[in-house]
Image (cartoon, rainbow, N blue to C red):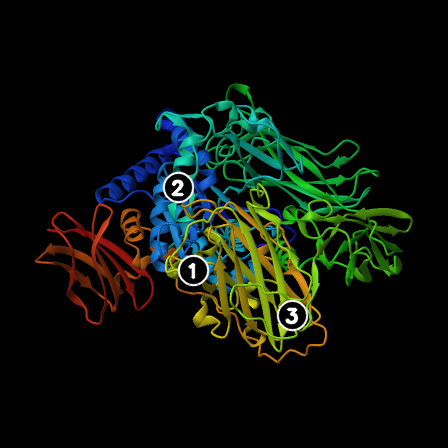
Amino acid sequence: MSNRTLGSGRGRSTAAPIVFKQKHYARRIGVVAVAAVIGGLAPGVATATASAATASTAAASAAGRTDPNLDVLFVGAHPDDEAFGLSTYGQWNEYDNAKIGVITITRGEGGGNAVGPEEGPALGKIREAEERSAVGRAGINDIYNLDQVDFYYTVSAPLTEQAWGHDDTLSRVVRVIRETQPEVITTMDTAPSPGNHGNHQYAGRMAFEAYRLAGDPNAFPDQITDEGLQPWTPLKLFRSGARGQATGSGPDCPTKFNPTRPEQNIYGVWSGRQSQRWNDTWAQVEREGQRQYASQGWAVFPDVSDDPNQLPCDFWTQVESRVPFPRGDLSQSGADPAAMLQGAVLPIPGGLPLGTGLEVKPEPFDVTPGGSTTVSVDLTAPDNGALKDVSLDVSAPDGWTVDGDASVGMVKAGQSVTREFTVTAADDAATNDRALVSADVHAKGSGNGQLTGHGDTELSVVPPVRGDQQPLPQVADFENWVDANHYPQMEGFVKPVLTLASGGSRTVDVTLTNFSDQTQSGDVTLDLPAGFSADPQSASYSDLAAGAQKVVSFTVTNTDASLPTSNQGGNAGDYDYRIVTTANGTQSSTQPALELVPTTTIDAAASAPTVDGVVSPGEYSGAPLNLSRLWEGSPCDSAQDCSAVGHLTRSGDDIYVAVEVTDDTLGTVLDASDCKRHWRTDSVELALDPAGDSENTSTTFKIGVLPTTTEGHVCFGRDADNNQGPGAQTAPDVQVASTVSNPYHGYVVEAKIPATELPSTVDPDHMGFNAFVYDSDTQDKTGQTRIGWSTWGGVQGDPYRWGLARFPGWTPPDVPTSDPVIPSDALASADSPQTIAQSVRNGVPLGGGPAADPGSSAVLQSASAGSGSVSATLRVRGTGEAHVFVVSGGDVLGSKVESVSGTGRVVIDVPVSGDASGARALLAYVADSGGTTSSASQVR
């Protein structure tokens, strides 16, 4: 079918044209429906199109290949990121014949391993196999690993970008989209909400950017000019989850959700629907899929309820759509399991024909009360038929006005038309809120029936001048990304917070933004809760030009040091307050929060403590630290179940830490070689941020300590910090000791940490410190409870939320700042027989990379079994590296990697274990000139 051009999608800038291509829809709307569609085409076109599709399918079948084209593509960071959407994907596959694929940017090499000591690439192979088994239950066959490294848990998208590389990762995602041509993209939450994994955030960013760029011929043009790919424009973009509160389960759970923003299109898919394929509910099928992730400790997940009324929904948020869609308002239309696919993969009942394009875009996105914005409606008729007697119905909230020409008339096949409307907000429109503008298209169908199509957009209602608390660095980075990529609908979900030391002071900057079209003057006031003060409490501003910004600074002090800190204080740890801004007599407010973190003063010890795992009288003179605050997991049943107290002191340039843990059950005792997995069992983690200003943990020092091992002694290692690895290698001057009570009722961990082992010089007035205690009462390497000193969800990755330690009278030694060591040992797709087999099957090159030029690559021609080896015969046309595997079922009998310097016929002998008769040889060839090819041969 022919190409056509649509607008660049919602945004505030002009982008290059997007090529909007339609696929043949035979796979999902059935033979009868296809016949009807073909009947509406111009003479000769139907036969040619159908013949081409048939010929393509026949050629692929003859080559033993499957069609790589997808309906839905999920973009995630790690194996298991898709696991809580398998119920939805499975239903789409079983009942709507939708073909779903998965991009997994890493293989999870940096994660934990509950089934063995493997880590790095060896763990990546395990996790890839787990993922293929898990998603197979939802009918998913294709997983595209992009070969980026999974380094460690972080909540930082900027650090993830540093490790993965923006352009490299984005080009791979775009290439896979162009190779597989999905109509729908699903992905993860891009916002830096507390605890949201930075890799997850960045995977979402890559999906969002690729959604915009994959159809742009000017984006990664070499993929088109050199590789022969075509631009491909996905039609819908969703993120998993929704902001709000689910209020019930059961078949009507899609209608039992209170969204934070009712203006969003949110869809619910009930997991209790019965699978005919599996003879069970999709909730249970999903659970069985999740259990495949044994390395992540998920094998012990319990069965779901057998009462359908207790089974919940998967919720999804539509971010953008280029086509008409059923409004996702969690009414019956939004509750249809197939609603998310309608308009893109499936036709909308009574709706405009499949292939119709519809976008609703505002410029600007922000509107003040009484102010106006322009909303454009872009409508494109399908390539196979005109839209007749078209009219538009554009609506806005009560009290708002809409002006514009709503008549359209006929839109010829493949033609696009645009109508612009001036939308004016009510004078009393609530500010710091969102409004919905809808565009409903009406057209005449066959037999004079009425066809409709819906599109909409959010608008942000802003005051003339708004005062915003300064964002955290990772939030500022996110906001910059939102602006650069024109996704304003993603703004405003992360609550503005700043930490403040208990009893301390800090500067709080307030940014004033003039959203109006005239110069403004007024004042800004901090309305703080009891126990806090501001200097000044109120400040004036003047001559703030339209569209301009100005920063006003305040010194905020916690005047009541007895207020609870961490997540024990305020509203889930937040001490909310208001920034009240006036502009020429108009008042508005925003509600950020302060978060108190605990502090401690560490005096020099009279003499250095003995590091022996015993807290002797007088060794630690300072006030003990309460380490019994819950931050994740199940609450302790009692102090005897799990509780802890910490001690700190300093001697010379050495920091001493002791943690006394009370515990009633000793969790799994691990081997010392598995010390990295400290968070799976009873252990202690100590975290130090030398200057107390780290954005992420790559500039901090963290050690995890197992109080005992199968070898009978303590072990420690560094993880998720400036330099990971075994303690003896990465922190050779650190000393650690422990004692474990007998009979067991707990343990003590003690450590000496020289300041010279830290990644930079200590600020003696502001060093970040935290102590975490992991509690497990099981023998299956699963933790139950996490307690500590400064406690928030995901706090192990959030240095800004750690407590503060002060060292009066100490001048620490100068320590050169160490560059972070980010693990880079990722499994390459050429070393994964699972991935190679997929590439052989569907023809999509490895790792999201390009295909090698056939004139400079190699192909596996044959494989023959010998005594203890298999001889693989290659036809080589260019130098490169051959990765040969001999596999039988799920077992790898042998493998060999060999550089190939010649051309012509090349034989590679692969040592094998066992009988290779009937096995299969796989070849991944990495050409020196660039790109890869994959081929296979039965062993004879």
Q: Give the Cα separation between the discs numbered 2 and 1.
A: 21 Å
* Relative side of 509 to 610, left or right: right
- Give the structural element (helix, strand or loop) at label 2: helix
| Callout 1 amino acid | Cys
Residue positioned 11% across, 49% down in the render: 917
x and y percentages locating residue 484 in the rendered image: 62, 57
Q: Which residue is mark 2?
A: 299
**Pointer 2 with pointer 1, Cβ within 8 A:** no
* Relative side of 587 to 236, left or right: right
Q: Which residue is outermost to the bottom?
A: 814
Q: Give the Cα separation between the discs numbered 2 and 3.
A: 41 Å
Q: Which residue is mark 1?
A: 675
* Relative side of 164 to 546, left or right: left
Residue positioned 56% across, 33% down in the render: 267
Quadrant the N terminus occupies: top left
Give above or below for 444 relative to 45.
above
| Callout 3 amino acid | Ala
Return the mark for residue 144.
Answer: none
Q: Which residue is mark 3?
A: 691
Disc nearer the start of the sequence (2/3)? 2
Mark 1, other Cα within 10 Å: few <14 / some 14–19 / many ≥20? many
